[in-house]
Amino acid sequence: MSLRSNRATAVQGLEVAAVDLGSNSFHMMVARANGSELQVIDRLREPVRLAAGLDADKRLHPEVQARALACLQRFGQRLRGIPQQQVRVVGTNTMRRMRRSEDFLAAAEMALGHEIEIIAGAEEARLVYGGVTHGMGRAKGRRLVVDIGGGSTEVIIGRGPNPELMESVSLGCVTHHQLFFEDGDITRAQFRKARLAARVQLEFLERRYRKAGWDVAIGASGTVRGVWRVMMANGWCENQITREGLEKVIELVLSRGHVNKIDFPSLREDRRPVFAGGLAALAGVFDALDLQKMETSERALREGLIYDLLGRLSNHDVRDESVNTMAERYAVDLNHAQAVERTALKILDQVGKSWNLEPKFSAMFLGWAARLHEIGLVISHSSYHKHGEYIIKHCDLQGFSQTDQKLLATLVRAHRSKLSPLTFDDLPSMWVEPMRRLTMILRLAVLLHRSREPDLRPPVKLSANRRALDMTFTQKTWLTRHPLTQADLEREAEYLKVVGMRLKVQ
């Protein structure tokens, strides 16, 4: 049996769940792995309209916040009994834009009973593409996938399972409705303006995407499916959205003249208030990319999350691939990185239980940080840890949430030189103590390998209590034969005092 088969077998029948906290609706899907497909057990969807609840200062209106938390409590009841590691919850465009979101996020996690990951636009695009194209094979060649959500539109071109171009644009049915149809009136002039504005939003990618080309265009999400249903109900298309049919839907909406008069039986009632905004966004996509037809897909971000989660559970984590790709791109000394990782994991093995560090999470982040701790050297040796932090914070790391990237960037920044009491202040409170301890482990591993001796395996034994670490060298003469390491450890003990940690070397 192949490794791929073993991985697939490991998750067969496993119940997993994905929750998508979108700008228009909150969605939850519970499913089981069934061969290469998903057996959907349950779906929940509620039109929360999160994007419409942001005020001019991008703060969430209390009424919308209450509506969102009530929805999450209901979702949370359904998720009880599913292990934490088998659930992924992501927030998208509106949660990315929200200011002072910490209090809402904490309340939302409490209501749901699970951690919420805020994902970047590029990561959202990757997950959408994976959800739409999973299991399609390569028969359709290059694919253009478009997902128009409540607050953003993801536009992706890929071949087979691999996305090649990915963009997330601040263009959604809710936000476009607010900009152009907030008073409810739908005039020809206003719709023309909304359609043109959508195209302008996409102008930066127009030439690049047209040049790349595609064999088939696929639209996902409620907006695209809603337009298709109206078209089908009126006999204006068969299985695809066509440009001709799209123009007929636009004329139909214009004939209504007001949002309240959009009462098409084929359109879900909760989608009617934002239909004109989504329709103008879709027309802008057709114009920008010169589309004549578009297939539609019922699958999108939720399915992408589920497939990604099943990959993690079967030890095929795309985050590993992202880290390894970045290490290669920045010409990391892989032998040295592996030596640092090996020693860091050895130390974790010895002190992790005493420090109450979750084994899998801690090993993953220590491993990633060890592999990437020197990427800043590509810029300059001076302050290379700061360069590394900047690169990790601002790059698109596939599979990583914004919190994941912040944690990894913090480890890389703090792996050497002086520490500040403020080093961990920017992290979510639940991560401050674990990251302080993982930082201490990584710093010691890097320090012990400063000589970069090939095949060096420092003979260290460590024990820990809440704020202290005792280090013993099992070969009594080892430290005296490595005077640079001895001096570094003495300096390290002084550095760690600043953040309330004690290091004792015997």
Image (cartoon, helix red, strand yellow):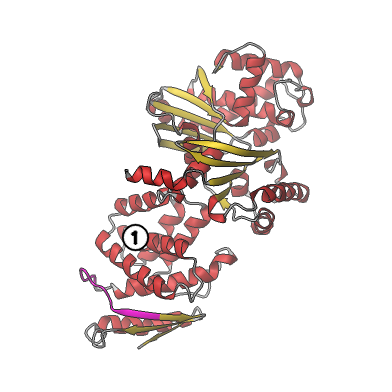
Start-end of magenta stretch: 452-462
Nearer the observer, 402 or 470:
470
Residue 342: quadrant of the picture:
bottom left
Q: Secondary structure at mark 1?
A: helix
Q: Position of residue 206 (x, y in %)?
A: 46, 29
Where 400 sits versus 369, above or below?
above
Nearer the observer, 137 or 454:
137
The residue drawn where x is 47% and y is 73% is: 353
Residue type at mark 1 is Arg
Q: Which residue is mark 1?
A: 371
Nearer the observer, 229 or 93:
229
Left/right placement of residue 128 relative to residue 503 reads: right
The residue drawn where x is 51% and y is 72% is: 356
Where 170 sits versus 329, above or below?
above
Q: How many marks?
A: 1
Q: Position of residue 130 (x, y in %)?
A: 47, 37
Pick the quarter of the image with the C terminus: bottom left
Q: Is residue 58 visible?
A: no
Q: Position of residue 487 (x, y in %)?
A: 31, 84
Nearer the observer, 2 or 414:
2
Where 176 sits versus 321, above or below?
above
Prevailing secondary structure class for the magenta stretch in the rendered image? loop
Q: Position of residue 70 (x, y in %)?
A: 74, 49
Where 367 sits versus 285, above or below?
below
Left/right placement of residue 30 relative to residue 411 reads: right
Asked whether 295 falls inside the magenta stretch, the response is no
